[in-house]
Amino acid sequence: MFITQKIMYRANIIRVVKRYKSRDTDFVPKNRILRQNRPNETKKKDDGVKTSASEAIKLLRALQKSQNEPITKSLVEQQTEKEKTAESDLDEAYLKFKENFLKNGVPDLGLFDPEKVQALRENSVYLGAESAAYSEKIYRAFKNECYDDGYNDAHRRWLNDSYVRLPTTNEEGARHQDLNSHWTKHVFLDDYVNLFPPGQIRVFMEAAACGLSQNPFLTVLEKQEHMEWFRQYFLNIEEDLINNEIVKPGALPEHPILTPGDDGMWPSEREIRKKYSEMNPFEKDWYGEKFGPMSHRIKKRRAKLEQLEEMDMAIEHELQDE
């Protein structure tokens, strides 16, 4: 079958070649007679016919030659070989450039004076550490001037190693310095309970002491303050307790469990004022009516106070008119 196809293919080639060789050159078709007034176009078309015939003969000869030669490589393999050769050429060029660069280096362009450059290198001073310290100082001042909403305080605790560690106990947390007392002083409050006379009051004080011993958020002084508050409360109603035969005269402790500090404040009052100072914007150095993160809130609060004062004045005028 392959032999018959080959014979037919050669017969077709011979037929095409004979057709082009036996063409009558004196024959002029009608369309060429009509286009004699346009010689350029006829010339172009004649050239096109001639070139197309020659190209057809060349293609046929190339096909005939390829039929006789065996196919050794596919088109994909030929393309991969071209790509590999191109890559190898690029690699060789890069290696030559690298070798020349390492040997010769970068040529001097003459943009700078070598003596001046060397003098600047010798006289220059490294200011990286000083710049970092100055930036840290500026940022610290910025944090102190800004309103502290809790994040800066938490960062400060982290730097001071005073942040809350879970699980929390009485000896850890943000107030670890105030709570830095032995756990027995936090838990065992029997010495203060035994000061009260036996009976209903002592039972009440035992319950209060049990609740205070389980509170991890109060200091020892704050717990003593609670016990002192109950002592003063029972002293104020001592007559009622005696009349109801709950206690006997002089049975309640007269000596205080705890007294205010040198500043005249109780421990709980001192802690409350401290928290109020942290949240109060009016005590800050950066406070301003026109600028600052709290300016809108301050203006709103003052407008509300003025409105309340006007309402009070109106009520007073109404009462006076009546």
Image (tube, grey):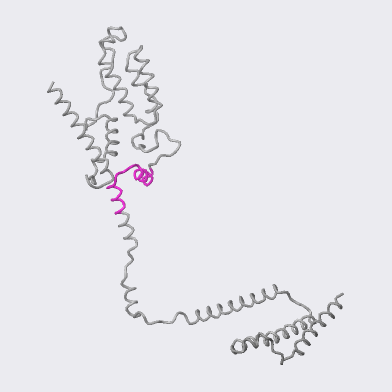
Q: Nearer the viewer, residue 231 or 110?
A: 110
Please state the extent of the stretch shown in magenta in the rendering.
Answer: 137-161
* Magenta portion: prevailing SS class: helix
Residue at the far bottom in the pictured view: 26
Left or right of 203, for residue 251: left
Q: Is residue 262 depicted above or below 62 in this figure?
A: above
Q: Nearer the viewer, residue 161 or 277?
A: 277
- Quadrant location of the C terminus? top left
Left or right of 185, for residue 93: right
- Locate residue 79: give its quadrant: bottom right
Q: Is residue 90 depicted above or below 187 in this figure?
A: below
Q: Is residue 225 depicted above or below 276 in this figure?
A: above
Residue at the far left in the pictured view: 321
* Number of dots carrying numbers: 0
Q: Position of residue 250 (x, y in %)?
A: 26, 12
Q: Nearer the viewer, residue 37 or 320?
A: 37
Q: Nearer the viewer, residue 116 or 84?
A: 84
Left or right of 137, for residue 107: right
Q: Please name the residue shown 59% across and 79% down the image.
A: 92
Q: Position of residue 87 (x, y in %)?
A: 61, 75
- Locate residue 219: give its quadrant: top left
Q: Position of residue 68 (x, y in %)?
A: 80, 82
Q: Please name the residue shown 34% across and 60% down the image.
A: 129
Q: Position of residue 53 (x, y in %)?
A: 70, 86
